[in-house]
């Protein structure tokens, strides 16, 4: 008999551990990073400040922020051999594959990769935070046949990321919308990629291995890959007038509509209003009411048909599109923000570790045995013994 009574498919509703890093509350539709509402952080803080908050539990003092900025800026360069490895990855591969490969090399090159001290773990977190945008920007530019743009250490994280990608710092409205998206993407409790990082950490593996695994988990369209998938959907629909008909057909084909639904939030994602406001400023800045109309009509139709609300990836996808990023770069941008949350969880898991190893309910064949002797049951035509 199948032992299914205890099974929680997809670990839905299972509380796997405690965390002091963030609290997702679907009842109040709120998200707190170390106690602070994410909307307040998105209104006022840089990603560097949020990184410090996630890693250390408190917002930085002016001196602590200056120290973090100095360290992060010192880590923005991309070594020749990391560039060479990125260049080896064919442009037919997804940018998330490039990033996964680059993070692996960045880890292998760190002589302190296995140092268990909290100071070394913090240094690794900053090393990743500084280098990831450099990889993402370098990769997008090489795909466009453009020369790399060196980092500027007089710019904050969000501005420098945009500068390295586009060769200029865009209008402050654009920089601010990008900053807001990074803060909103930074952390979200035990989502699939963070949980992946914690599982890897729980075996006492190293931080880089955990981040490589998390990048792989984030890539999938049911998770971070959805921001890219949203843009493909909007491109496929093309015009607001086709939104309802497109949705009816997609639902009839039982397609998952990217950017809608959430495992934890069932009445809307707490981050969406803030990101939608940022998208609205971009729509006004770039003069693209057509995109806003398509966005609104698809959302209204989805809510009317299925009662399913958008998640953060729905406004983020078109926001990154308007900023000028290639669609395949959207999920790597998510990595550049979420690496702060991942590394906070990796440090929390390592600091109070228990191997993560759930049980399974077996539903394969009942116990059976090989025949007694080699001659007793000759192999059939297939070569398989009965
Ligand atoms: C940053 C992030 O990672 S946010 C998530 C990003 N992912 C996406 O946007 C992908 C699209 N969304 C989905 O696939 C899902 O909503 C998930 C994976 C995010 C959450 O899934 P679950 O918690 O497993 O929800 P579940 O599958 O139980 O959904 C309940 C019902 O709503 C349906 N549903 C949920 N989301 C969607 C969707 N986006 N499109 C169509 N139907 C949906 C399911 O098919 C299911 O219907 P059923 O009861 O008839 O089978
Ligand atoms: O929490 C989740 O399952 C997915 C999500 O929204 C995130 O990781 O930001």
Image: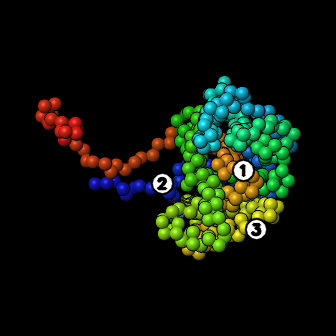
Mark 2 and mark 3 residues within 8 Å of each other at the beta carbon: no
SS state under label 2: helix
The residue under the point 57% across, 69% down is 246
Closer to the chain start, of discs 2 and 3, is 2
Quadrant location of the C terminus? top left
Cβ at disc 2 under 8 Å from ligand 1: yes
Cβ at disc 1 under 8 Å from ligand 1: no
> Would residue 69 appear left or right of 116 to someone viewing this image?
right
What is the C-alpha distance between the residues marked 2 and 3? 39 Å
Q: Nearer the viewer, residue 1 or 255?
A: 255
- When asked about the image quadrant of residue 343, the answer is top right
Closer to the chain start, of discs 1 and 3, is 3
Residue hosting label 3 = 289
The residue under the point 59% across, 70% down is 302
Q: Is residue 354 above or below residue 260?
A: above
Confirm whether residue 93 shows in the render: yes
Name the residue at the left extreme.
Answer: 376
Name the residue at the front extreme.
Answer: 145
Q: Is residue 258 above or below residue 336?
A: below
Residue hosting label 2 = 10
Residue hosting label 1 = 325
Q: Position of residue 63 (x, y in %)?
A: 86, 40
Q: Nearer the viewer, residue 305 or 188?
A: 305
SS state under label 3: helix
SS state under label 1: loop
Using a 10 Å C-alpha cutoff, classify the residue at mark 2 as few (fewer than 14 neighbours), some (14 to 19) or many (20 or more). few
């Amino acid at each position: 008999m199948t032992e299914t009574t205890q099974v929680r498919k997809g670990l839905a509703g299972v509380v796997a551990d405690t965390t002091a890093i963030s609290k997702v509350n679907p009842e109040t539709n709120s998200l707190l990073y170390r106690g602070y509402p994410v909307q307040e952080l998105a209104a006022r803080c840089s990603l560097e400040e949020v990184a410090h908050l996630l890693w250390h539990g408190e917002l930085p003092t002016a001196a602590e922020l200056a120290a973090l900025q100095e360290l992060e800026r010192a880590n923005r360069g991309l070594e020749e051999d990391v560039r060479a490895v990125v260049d080896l990855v064919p442009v037919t591969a997804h940018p998330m594959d490039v990033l996964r490969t680059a993070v692996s090399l960045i880890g292998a090159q760190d002589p302190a990769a296995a140092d268990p001290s909290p100071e070394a773990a913090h240094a690794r977190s900053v090393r990743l935070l500084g280098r990831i945008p450099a990889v993402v920007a370098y990769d997008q530019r090489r795909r466009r046949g453009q020369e790399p743009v060196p980092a500027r250490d007089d710019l904050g994280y969000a501005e420098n990321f945009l500068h390295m990608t586009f060769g200029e710092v865009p209008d402050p409205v654009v920089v601010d919308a990008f900053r807001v998206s990074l803060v909103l993407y930074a952390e979200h409790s035990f989502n699939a990629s963070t949980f992946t990082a914690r599982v890897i950490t729980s075996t006492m593996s190293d931080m880089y291995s955990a981040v490589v695994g998390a990048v792989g988990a984030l890539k999938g369209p049911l998770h971070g890959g959805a921001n890219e998938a949203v843009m493909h959907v909007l491109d496929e629909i093309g015009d607001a007038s086709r939104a309802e008909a497109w949705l009816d057909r997609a639902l009839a084909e039982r397609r998952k509509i990217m950017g809608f639904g959430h495992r934890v939030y069932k009445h809307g994602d707490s981050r969406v209003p803030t990101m939608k406001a940022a998208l609205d400023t971009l729509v006004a800045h770039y003069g693209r009411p057509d995109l806003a109309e398509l966005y609104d009509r698809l959302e209204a139709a989805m809510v009317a048909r299925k009662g399913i609300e958008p998640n953060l990836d729905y406004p983020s996808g078109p926001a990154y599109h308007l900023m000028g990023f290639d669609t395949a770069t959207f999920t790597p941008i998510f990595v550049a923000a979420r690496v702060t949350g991942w590394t906070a969880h990796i440090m929390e898991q390592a600091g109070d570790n228990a191997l993560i190893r759930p049980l399974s309910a077996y539903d394969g064949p009942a116990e059976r045995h090989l025949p007694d002797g080699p001659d007793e049951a000759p192999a059939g035509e297939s070569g398989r013994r009965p």
